[in-house]
Image (tube, rainbow, N blue to C red):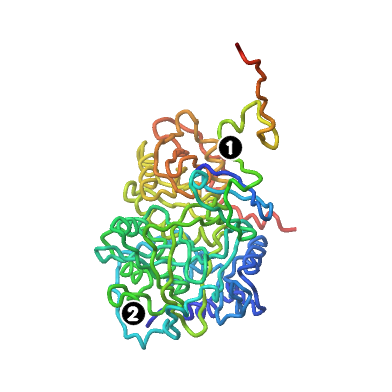
Amino acid sequence: MDIFNITCPACGKGYYADMLLYSLDLELHCPFCDVYFRKEDSPHVFAGGASASAVARLAGGLSKEMIYRPFRKRER
Amino acid sequence: MSRDLTSWLDLLSSEAPDELAQVTREVNPAQFESAVIVDALEREGRFPAVLFEKVTDIKGRATSCRLLSNTFGTFRKIGLALGINSGERMELLDLILRKSSKSFAPEGIQLNRAPVRAFVHKGDRVDLSRLPLVRHTELDGGPYFTPVVVSRNMQGRYNVSWNRMQYLDEKHLAIYMSPRHLWSYFAAQEAEGKDLPIAVVLGHHPAFHLSGAMLVPLDVDEYAATGGVMGNALRLIPSESWGEDFWIPADAEIVLEGKILARRRCVEGPFGEFTGYTGPQRLSWVVEILAVYGRKTPTIIDIFPCKTEHMNAHLPIEASIYARAKQAVPGIVKTCWVGSGGPFNLIMSLNKKTEGEPMRAAMAAMSASNFIKHVIVVDSDVDPENKSEVMWALSSRIQADQDVTILKNLQGQVLDPSLRHEIKSSGMIIDATLPLDRPFPRRGEVPEQIRKQINVLEYLEG
């Protein structure tokens, strides 16, 4: 099965889980510190997939600020 | 005579004392201490059963329990569990097949004669945190039991299976079920909105645990089949919660009585598995424990899932695979799945009589179990247990474009880490046998007749 890597927001340690859990509305369980947390609170989630090996990929992943938004003059 | 874990430990001490190590110092299994000992022994190439005399519960408190690891670390110990003092693979496979074909109907006994009822805790007195659960690998999602789970379907057939169970809280465990009998029993109950009663057996005679790995036809009751493997009728008592509607093993060390809850799920794992990998955290099922029974000083059997003993304990599955392949092609000489170097690789040797037999034998083996993904078939001059010989045959007897067959869309093993889909797999058959329809070079050997005539020692002396 496909899996995703995730980092616990409480202890900062990483592990992995079934992709099914990625799509469900539930709390994940950290095997290191026993904390239950939501993936949205994780500082790092890596799901892989075809895009993970894209030639334009960035080490460490992309954040919102890294995405360039084109500046366009308002057309009249 | 009833057979229990104590009787087997006594037998092991007398027949094979080198196969048993005892640790008298207190260990905390939930903090990896027992796993580290077994791991260290395996790294040294040693596989004794390890009896931890003093173990703590998951909160580090002393318990009255003992913990037995590496019960199945060698084939010899499996032989002793089955009643023979031998660790030879094919002898064990034949014995397992003979025993599993002779069922013994289980025998009900009175509650007061059941060793497992030295104590009975129910309701508020159930506290799983008082038991020694084990962490084995660094990513394990929590402390685990590696027990045998007994279940019963709507038609009254009992099933005996291995299932990993993670501690959740004082009264709940997570259970992971592969899509086999237990899973189908639960699915049928859940479809009607009902929970499934189960008994979690934390220790019994090793033959009982081996029965959990047998591929038993659905028309055979697994309590009866287990009696066959143990060599006597299994002694049972009615359960606390369901009376005579659900029977539990009387000679077990500890039994947790509970139910898999309908319409409840939890996150479970990661968990180090027989594949040698730590599998991911998954969606699993929830068990509520209703009662705990046990002996005065019970011994819990723990299986280290990533280590040799876990694959060894699958030997009954190899017996079924061997039987299925031999039924298809009688010339099968030997199989090697357990110890083949990979959890999904099967190597078989045969006395080939016609072309096509290797493929037929391989497909029969694959159909016997979804544990088998790759099959290598060799001639009987190659020992499937000798990996150098197998690799020699692979390199010198096949042409990949002709002798390798790829199969698609098989039902795979859900714990196979290479699967992208949850269960759909591909398979591979390699026919590394010599062709019968064209000449092929012979092995390079000195003449056998002259080898027999010459006493080598006479030449080498002095």
Q: Residue placed at 59% from the left, 69% from the top? A: B48
Q: Where is residue B312 in the image (x, y as percent from the top left)?
A: 50, 60
On the question of residue B409 being in view, the answer is yes
**The N terminus of chain B is located in which quarter?**
bottom left
User: To which residue does mark 2 refer?
Assistant: B237
Picture mark count? 2
Q: Residue placed at 35% from the left, 38% from the top? A: B354
Comparing B40 with B423, the one in front is B423
Instruction: Give the amino acid type for the residue marked by disc 2 in the picture.
Output: Ile
Comparing B73 with A28, the one in front is A28
Above or below, B182 against B5 in this view is: above
On the question of residue B429 being in view, the answer is no
Instruction: Give the amino acid type for the residue marked by disc 1 in the picture.
Output: Gly
- Side (left or right) of B257 relative to B391: left
Q: Residues within 10 Å of mark 1 (few under 14, many from 20)?
A: few
Determine the secondary structure under disc 1.
loop
Q: Where is residue B231 in the image (x, y as percent from the top left)?
A: 36, 73
Determine the secondary structure under disc 2.
strand
Q: Residue placed at 61% from the left, 31% from the top? A: A53
- Side (left or right) of B221 relative to B13: left
Q: How crowded is mark 2: few (under 14 residues within 10 Å), some or many (20 or more)?
A: many
**Residue A48 got which mark?**
1
Q: Disc 2 versus disc 1: distance between alpha carbons?
A: 52 Å
Q: Do tags 2 and 1 sit on the same chain?
A: no
Comparing B156 with B14, the one in front is B156
